[in-house]
Image (cartoon, rainbow, N blue to C red):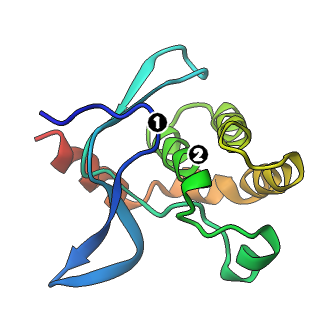
Amino acid sequence: MNKINNNLPVIKPVLKNQQVIKKIWQTAGDHCFNSPIDGALKFIPRGFKFDGATIPALFWWPLRLHPFSPRIITAALEHDFCYYLKLDRKKSDKLFYRNLRKHGINKVRAWVMYRAVRAAGWVFYLQNKHWFKKSVIHALR
């Protein structure tokens, strides 16, 4: 059984035919966190696929952040998992902001990223990408 990691998640790229699938990564170990949304412990299983922080490449340099930066990866993973579970979107977005601040992102950058998920996150929330579903079903087998 994998050790549960309460700090930074361990992630790895998703491979298909020995090739890296761009922008889709998966957890290499189990990850859990206490959700302020519903007060419950959330367990993200090994193999959960996600796309990191959805930051358009145009903004990587101004924000000085990459979608898989260690400083934002926990926020992105837990936020994507809350979207997968269809937890309250506004509260999920606030969790994203709190995680960014907790991991050292300054208030201005965190606020810009929070406003971006508030403005455009509904698209991803409603979409619930097929690889989210498949990864959780596969991981729980």
The residue that appears at 51% across and 41% down in the rendered structure is 78
Residue designated by label 1? 7
Quadrant of residue 88 within the rendered picture: top right
SS assignment at label 1? loop
The residue that appears at 82% across and 56% down in the rendered structure is 109
SS assignment at label 2? helix
Residue 84 screen position, x and y as percent: 45, 44
Query: Which residue is the extreme one toward the top?
Result: 39
State the CA–CA distance, disc 2 to disc 1: 11 Å
Asked if residue 107 lies left or right of residue 60, the reply is right
Residue designated by label 2? 75
Determine which of the numbered discs, if any, sits on residue 67 in the image.
Answer: none
Taking depth in this image into account, of 71 and 81 the one nearest to the observer is 71
Taking depth in this image into account, of 112 and 101 the one nearest to the observer is 101
Q: Identity of the amino acid at label 2?
A: Ala
Residue 99 screen position, x and y as percent: 65, 38
The residue that appears at 66% across and 69% down in the rendered structure is 55
For the residues carrying marks 2 and 1, which lies nearer the camera in this image?
A: 1
Query: Which residue is the extreme one toward the right?
Result: 108
